[in-house]
Image (cartoon, grey):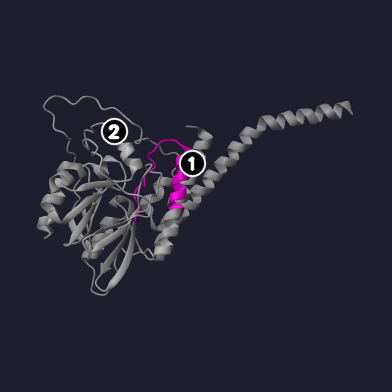
Amino acid sequence: MRQHFIFTFLAFLLSAQNAPAQQEQATMDQALLHARNGLDAATDFPGYASLCDLEARIRNVNAPRERAPRPAGSTQQRERSFGPQPIPPTQIFDNLWILGTESVVAFLYGSPAGYILIDGLNNDAEAEEYVFKGLPEAGIDPAAIKAVLVTHGHGDHYGGADLVAERLGIDILMTQEDWDLVAGFGVHPRFGPPPKLGGVVTDGEILSFGESTLQIFVTPGHTPGTISPVLELYDGDRVHRALLWGGTGFNFGRFASIFRQYADSAQKARAIAREKGIDVLLSAHPRRDGTLEKLARLTDRAPDTAHPFVSGEEGLALFTVLEQCALAQGARIEVEGP
């Protein structure tokens, strides 16, 4: 009896010692399963597949940071070349224009009665080139822009917004969470300073300008107050609804809780997309969603043929990619630690 008790006690101790390792293995198995699900869903979204890379380095660009003093005589922002693929203002729907570079774009939404500029490009030089020079060349008066809506507080989206807002006398709009975020950023050599506090948008809010409206949905994760607006688009007599996913990359640090928040936002966006009948998905990063290829197909589009930016209900699989890759990375971090 005593030997049996000792054997049982030793087995219990051995099991207790192995429990953490078994739990870690189970969590890592979950990470691998989520990654596989994400990759399976990414067949039509190759630009997003890297989100499921469980060996990828995860930076944190959301952390407050001080910048070194700039040398005397230096310009406010350092210009940077993004390669040979500028995207001059190009009409992709009757009431939507895209402008910027293959790295990051802004969208001009509305009509001559009033536009809203969604995001502000990398810096003042790009805002000058694509907004104040490019739009008039495309027959659009920049003075018709009523506000700059920034999807999230990263410099490649707000870098030129201050120039546009100051020159036109209009507001920059962000969530309060992201106004708080950018307040901790110093002057960046590439993006310049963060914008000064402007207007605040909230979840579910409808913005009206000229003849147009859009609806704000807050989808935190990429930043604390990322937004993903919903737009109504026109292609002749066809009406489409688009969702612009506000922030994609996993560059917000090794925080499992934020990855879970990101996954929740992807679920929320999927539900919104189904409710609103979303059939167009937009990204400010053309390398992610194949924008360059779509623009080429749009140029060659024959009358009464399918619009290359319209993905239909099948496009909603993107939110499975975003959700599953986020869950995969969150589980990985639970095992590896911050």
**Residue 318 can be seen in this image:** yes
Image coordinates for residue 199, horizontal then vertical, percent: 27, 46
What amino acid does circle 2 point to? Phe
Q: Residue furthest right?
A: 1
Q: Observer-nearest residue: 14 or 278? A: 278
- Pick the residue in front: 196 or 74: 196
Residue 237's spot in the image, x, y percent?
Answer: 26, 74
Pointer 2: residues within 10 angstroms few (<14), some, or many (20+)?
many
Secondary structure at badge 2 equals loop
Label 1, on which residue? 330
Q: Which residue is mark 2?
A: 185
Identify the residue shown where x is 33% and y is 37%.
180
* For residue 313, side relative to residue 298 (left or right): right
Tell whether position 255 is magenta. Answer: yes
Question: Which image quadrant is residue 138 in?
Answer: bottom left
Q: Is residue 291 magenta?
A: no
**x 82%, y 26%: residue:** 6
The magenta segment is 244-267
How far from the left and from the top, in percent, is residue 41? 45, 56
10 Å neighbourhood of mark 1: few (<14), some, or many (≥20)? many
Q: Is residue 42 visible?
A: no
Vertical relation: 114 (above or below) 157: below
Q: What is the spatial separation of the Cα atoms under label 1 and label 2, in whole angstroms?
A: 26 Å
Q: Secondary structure at mark 1?
A: helix
